[in-house]
Image (spheres, rainbow, N blue to C red):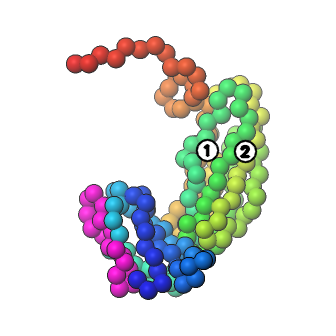
Amino acid sequence: FGNHLWTTDQQSVSVTDVTDPANPVQLAVEDTPSWAMHVVGQNGGAYVADWQKLARYTLDPSQLAPDADASASALYFVGTTDKGTMTVTNRGGSDLVISGMQIADPRFTISVDKLTVPPGDTMQIKLDYANDGTDLETTLCIATNDPDEPIQEISLASSSSGSSVLIGEMAPNFNLLFV
């Protein structure tokens, strides 16, 4: 509608200002509850159809906010792995400010390329891990000015939880039976 382009990627609905088509500006993103399949912009908002229902979304330009989206919910340090990298994308319409990061495990060192992330941009987090071979199970906490999710937690582990096999190792032999 007008200069706003509404789109969906099955996980979320987003609105982008296309006043200057050569330089589109993402204004807002909202996760949808269930596989958003279709979107139609109308009267300053959009209708989104997913597998469960039809919902209406609107944009209030005076309420643009940052939206932090981490590239991973977990990082695994398998075997002798001692480095990890992830990104945080600002899917919102105003600057995302990283106000703090913390890992309780003293074997980690955190470095970032920036603490303020403009709309549509990303920041990179690098983790250096003094891997001593002992089990790892901790959390990276990221504090931001994202009003919906001010604290994001990323699991850091030496294997996937509940598994006796490390990621990257050969799976044990098994038989598959059809009943």
Closer to us: 25 or 167: 25
How many labels, in total? 2
**161 part of magenta stretch:** no
**Which secondary structure, mark 2?**
strand
Q: Which residue is mark 2?
A: 127
Q: In this rendered view, identify the residue nearer to me: 176 or 134.
A: 176
Which marked residue is nearer to the observer: mark 1 or mark 2? 2
Residue indicated by mark 1:
139
Disc 1, SS: strand
Q: Is residue 6 above or below residue 115?
A: below
Give amino acid for label 2: Leu
Query: x and y percent of residue 56 in the render?
Result: 32, 74
Q: Residue furthest front?
A: 22
Classified by dominant secondary structure, the portion drawn in magenta counts as strand
Which residue is pictured at 46% across the width and 69% down the height? 14
Which label's residue is closer to the chain start, 1 or 2? 2
How many residues crowd around disc 2 within 10 Å: few (fewer than 14), some, or many (20 or more)? Answer: some
Estimate the x, y position of residue 4 in percent, counting from the top left: 46, 80
Image height check: is 71 above or below 18?
Answer: above
> Quarter-wise, where is residue 136 in the image?
top right
Specify the amino acid type for callout 1.
Thr
Q: Is residue 46 magenta?
A: yes
- Give the percent coordinates (x, y) of residue 9: 43, 60
Q: Residue at x 46, y 13 (%)?
A: 173
Specify start and end residues of the magenta stretch as a single range.
40-55
**Does residue 167 appear left or right of residue 175 in this picture?**
right
* Depth check, front residue: 18 or 151: 18
